[in-house]
Amino acid sequence: MLLPLLVSLLTVANARVQTVNGKIKLEIGVTSRCGDAHNFINAFAPVYEKYERFLDVEFVPWARTQRGETELRCQFGVEDCWANRVQRCVLDALPDRRSAVEYMLCEFTRPLPAYSGSYSCARAMGLRLVDVDYCVSTTGEDLDRRFEAKATEPMRIVGFVPYIVVNGVADFALSESVRLGAEGVICAALGDDPSTGVDPADCPN
């Protein structure tokens, strides 16, 4: 048991994130009730605030959702499915990445509004609730297929929620390196790219 764990930890430690044209693209797969996703998003929000101009972030609220014959089945039940649908609809309606991060931080702050049946985070982002509700009850089915397609391969490869796809690459070690130490990993990658102006000496160890 110890040897596989040690190999896994060493693999994560050696994973290196790199910039592409001075930026890092992160696709973050979540589900509304997941405690690990809650922890990551709350830790990631200040990192995004610090390095926003270098980060292209997209959220994928799908994760372990499975498609049955007549309905979706989610990891944490019906409430999880509904909340994920709400998040997909809201994210699709928001104008930019910063708004998406602010919105997801709201949703992953206790008491997890959408999971609790509330549109309060959508309202806080200035969206018309009638539009959000219409999406949830109708057009959200089209979004389901789009987000399902995004999540299928990363979930197969990473197999953990949240997963983080880095610059379009789904890789367990890269995902875990960002999940477990986003600020250090992102800062180091930016510090390796002289065009960013980030000093590696300022990065946390």
Image: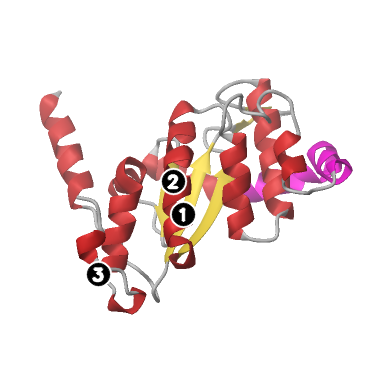
Q: Position of residue 15 (x, y in %)?
A: 23, 53
For disc 2, the marked residue is: 44
The reply to whether residue 68 is in sight is: no
Amino acid identity at mark 3: Asp
Q: Quadrant of the N terminus?
A: top left
The x and y percentages for residue 3 are 11, 30
Which residue is located at x 65 percent, y 51 percent?
146
Q: From the top left corner, tell me how far across and down residue 158 is, in percent.
A: 38, 42
| Residue carrying label 3 | 192
* Kind of residue sitting beneath label 1: Tyr
Q: Position of residue 171 (x, y in %)?
A: 34, 50
For residue 135: magenta?
A: yes
Q: Residue at x 57, y 22 (%)?
A: 76
Rendered image quadrant of residue 80: top right
Which portion, as a residue range, is magenta? Answer: 129-148
Inspect the image, locate mark 2, and give the three-letter code of the amino acid beneath it. Answer: Phe
- The correct choice, above or below, for 5 with respect to 141 in the image is above
Residue at image x 44%, y 46%?
44
Is residue 159 on the magenta stretch? no
- Label 2 crowd bin: few (<14), some (14–19), many (20+), radius 10 Å: some
Count of numbered circles in the view: 3
Q: Name the colour scheme.
A: secondary structure
Determine whether, in the image, residue 162 is placed left or right of residue 118.
Answer: left
List the single residue furthest toward the bottom: 195
Q: For the residue carrying disc 3, how many other residues have a C-alpha within 10 Å: few (<14), some (14-19), or many (20+)? A: some
- What label does residue 48 carry, if any? 1
Q: Earlier in the sequence, mark 3 or mark 1?
A: 1
Q: Which element carries disc 1, helix, strand or loop?
A: helix
